[in-house]
Image (spheres, grey):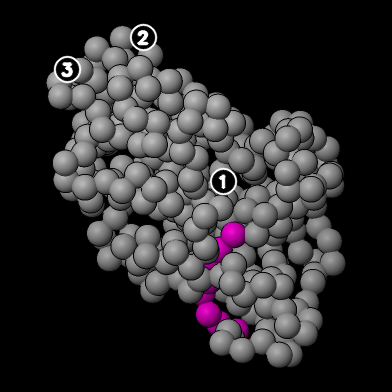
Amino acid sequence: MTRAVVVERFGGPEHLRLTEKPEPHAGPGQIRVHVTAAGLNPVDLRIAEGGPSAQKFGVVPPFVNGNDFAGVIDEVGDGVTGWMPGQRVYGGARCAAQTDHLIVDDPTILNRTPDNLADEAAGSLDIAGRTALAGIRALRLDDSDIVLVSAAAGGVGVFACQLARQTGATVIGTASTGNHEFLRSLGVIPISYGDGIDERIAEVAPSGLTAVFDANGVETIELGLTLGVPPERINSVADRAAAERLGALSVGRGTTPTSAVAEIAAAIATGALRMYLDEIFPLERARDAYERLASGHVRGKLALSLEPDARQAGGRS
């Protein structure tokens, strides 16, 4: 038998159920991954709630939850080339990831995991890594830029800040005060969100902003426009509809293939980029993990461990 976290019906985390089903096996052209870790993303919650996100991906309950995963190939079907049992891999499989044994029909969703990268980290990269990479590239930053990153301490924001810093740009990041010292450790100028944010930006960037990376929502897009940032230099990965309405960019994960995130994985493995895992939950506590995600103020990422000896942990960089 194999375990899976299933969305029984649309709604909140209370409708997630850990089930058992017959163990699947790789058929011709297929790869089976023994999943050891699975990252959480806000979009998982939106899909599980139903509505436009679920309609976009064509899912109806019951379905397996989650997208991001990492593990080890343990079966390869006839006709598969370039992959073999024992290889560590990670990737993204929409509404399929949170299960002990994942059948992969399309090998292009897989990347090989660097030796020095833990599965919990690799298994949290697909959505956040690809989104940040595509979103920052779209802004075409250089060392003359001063860029505002909203939700800077979140899963996407942590990567976006560091990728922006690598271009030479000055990065200002919005976050709760408890995350300010963490952002400073990434070379980011932290500011609090909320009333008076425009004055706080003026204090740290008296010459003004030149670009905005929005990982929070329409308020950040509107703030950038109010502060005189051209709409073509505002990229929202949080609110596509608002970006289109206001003339801003909305370039994110969908424009970037799975293979692109390999450069982020390699950079984390060598220490050139930092990843922060706020907490790791055993699979049996998937509901608790999503309730924590829904509560907000998560630093970096949350992940599930599917290993039998999983221990809850926090603060892994």
The quadrant holding residue 30 is: bottom right
Residues at marks 2 and 3, CA–CA distance in whole angstroms: 14 Å
Magenta stretch bounds: 85-92
Mark sitting on residue 6: none
Pick whichever, 132 or 250, lies toward us: 250
Around disc 2, counting alpha carbons within 10 Å, would you say few (fewer than 14), some (14 to 19), or many (20 or more)? few
What's the amino acid at mark 2?
Answer: Asp
What's the amino acid at mark 3?
Answer: Glu
Mark 2: secondary structure:
loop
Residues at marks 1 and 2, CA–CA distance in whole angstroms: 30 Å
Around disc 1, counting alpha carbons within 10 Å, would you say few (fewer than 14), some (14 to 19), or many (20 or more)? many
In percent of the image, x 73 and y 90: which residue is there?
78
Q: Are marks 2 and 3 in contact (CB under 8 Å)?
A: no
Q: Are marks 1 and 2 in contact (CB under 8 Å)?
A: no
Pick whichever, 286 or 83, lies toward us: 83
Mark sitting on residue 40: 1
Residue receiving disc 2: 195
